[in-house]
Amino acid sequence: MRLRFLGAAGEVTGACFLLELRGARGETVSALLDCGLFQGGRLAGERNRRFAFDPRAIAFVLLSHAHIDHSGLIPRLAARGFAGPVYCTPATEELLGVMLPDAGHLQEREAEREGEEPLYTAEQARACLRLARAVPYRRPFRPHPLVECTFRDAGHILGSAIVELRAAGRTLVYSGDLGQPGRPIVDDPETVAGAEALLVESTYGDRNHKSLAQSLEELADAITDTIAVRRGNVVIPAFAVGRTQELLTYLAELRAQKRVPPAEIYVDSPMATEATRITLRHARLPILESVRFTESAEESRRLAELRSGAIILSASGMCEGGRIRHHLRAALPRPECAIVFVGFQAAGTLGRRIVEGEPTVRIQGEEVPVRARVYTIGGLSAHAGRDALLDWMAAFARAPRQTFVVHGEPLAAHALRAAIEERLGWPARVPANGEAVEI
């Protein structure tokens, strides 16, 4: 079994790992673990346009979850000749039906602004959905006669999966994105028995999150100061799938406990609205009566004109596209407003530049001064912190012979690697992008 790291190696976005499996008669089967979009800066756009393999040679894709940095290049893969199945969980299949066409629509709009061909169109995204094959958690399946797989709950977002793959007498486990234990809507990550090789994410591999109680206190303080004292609006860039639904749960809790002042809560993302409907079909989710889900672009523009008393949740979570940009353009110059980040901001993204304190940022061709208060509440992240990652690995019944630390920026990835070696006594390494290893 040969494994090649083609994304999310020394970085967070663009998850893509090429598996080459050799049969007894010398035949080779190629497959992908995830096929995600690179995000952050012009270079990401160039990387998204070329594959390091022939898409026609890929037999199947094993998809960990629906987030675009894991699934967002599947439409381009199909448009370039891939015709095999994409295996995922049932909830992920439902979410792909919302997220990929939306991503295609954004690609078309971006291409029109830049005067270039879109990475893929909304129609191409809809067309690739026919390739999805849903398999429930804990039900073994064979994507190919040489391979047996099982999906286990990763506890990251609805439908997120740990991929357990067995071939040629060896077991490979890919963590996907692991969730922080004790969160609403999703269950805690499942443990696995063991593996010869492990790919483990490291988004927060260099630090732990504050407790949920501390994080909710920070959120309540940010809302109270902005709405009741400063008389502004709270703008929250939130991933449409997972983060928006969790935030609605937390806001309902804070409202019931009277820990935040009255405010109108808006979800301004058609994709988040549909993802909330899907979530309600799979999980229990308290709904605030005061939540308003906007639909049309005109409603969204009017929302950006509100001067005070509003909490606006909008996508994308890293501010790389979507309606969040005109809400930022309206709120950033106003000292009475607050921008509250509740998820990881990858290097090169607009969200990262705001978090790092740039005095002005460019949005939709305009230089926008950053005068609003900026809050970063990492404890609400859907990614496991360092100790939660180590606890998940410590539950393995047998230690992997090879551990590869992926899906993390260099500082986080190498910190987790060192912690694995020190606490668990496992050999671990951070692979380079493009590197190939034998399992």
Image: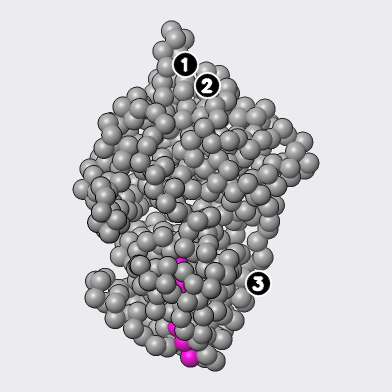
Whether residue 18 is visible, yes or no, is: yes
Q: Tell me what residue is drawn at x 59 percent, y 59 percent.
A: 182
- Residue 330 belongs to the span the image colors magenta: no
Locate residue 253, reporting x and y percent. 52, 76
Do the CB atoms of the residues marked 1 and 3 lie less than 8 Å apart?
no
Residue under pointer 2: 1
Q: Secondary structure at mark 1?
A: strand
Task: Give me the disc on residue 22.
Answer: 1
Q: Secondary structure at mark 3?
A: helix
The picture quadrant where one finds residue 50 is top left
> In the displayed structure, does residue 174 sit left or right of residue 110?
right
* In the image, residue 349 above or below residue 196: below
Nearer the observer, 412 or 349: 349
Do the CB atoms of the residues marked 2 and 1 lie less than 8 Å apart?
yes
> In the displayed structure, does residue 313 sit left or right of residue 207?
left
The picture quadrant where one finds residue 62 is top left
- Residue 234 belongs to the span the image colors magenta: yes
Locate residue 407, reporting x and y percent. 55, 45
Q: Secondary structure at mark 2?
A: loop
Q: What amino acid does circle 2 point to?
A: Met
Q: Earlier in the sequence, mark 1 or mark 3?
A: 1
Image: magenta residue range: 231-238
Q: Tell me what residue is drawn at x 58 percent, y 47 percent.
A: 408
Distance Cα–Cα, label 1 vs label 3: 50 Å
Residue under pointer 3: 214
* In the image, residue 221 above or below residue 176: below
Q: How many C-alpha atoms fall within 10 Å of the one at disc 1: few (<14), some, or many (≥20)?
A: some
Q: Tell me what residue is drawn at x 49 percent, y 40 percent.
A: 7
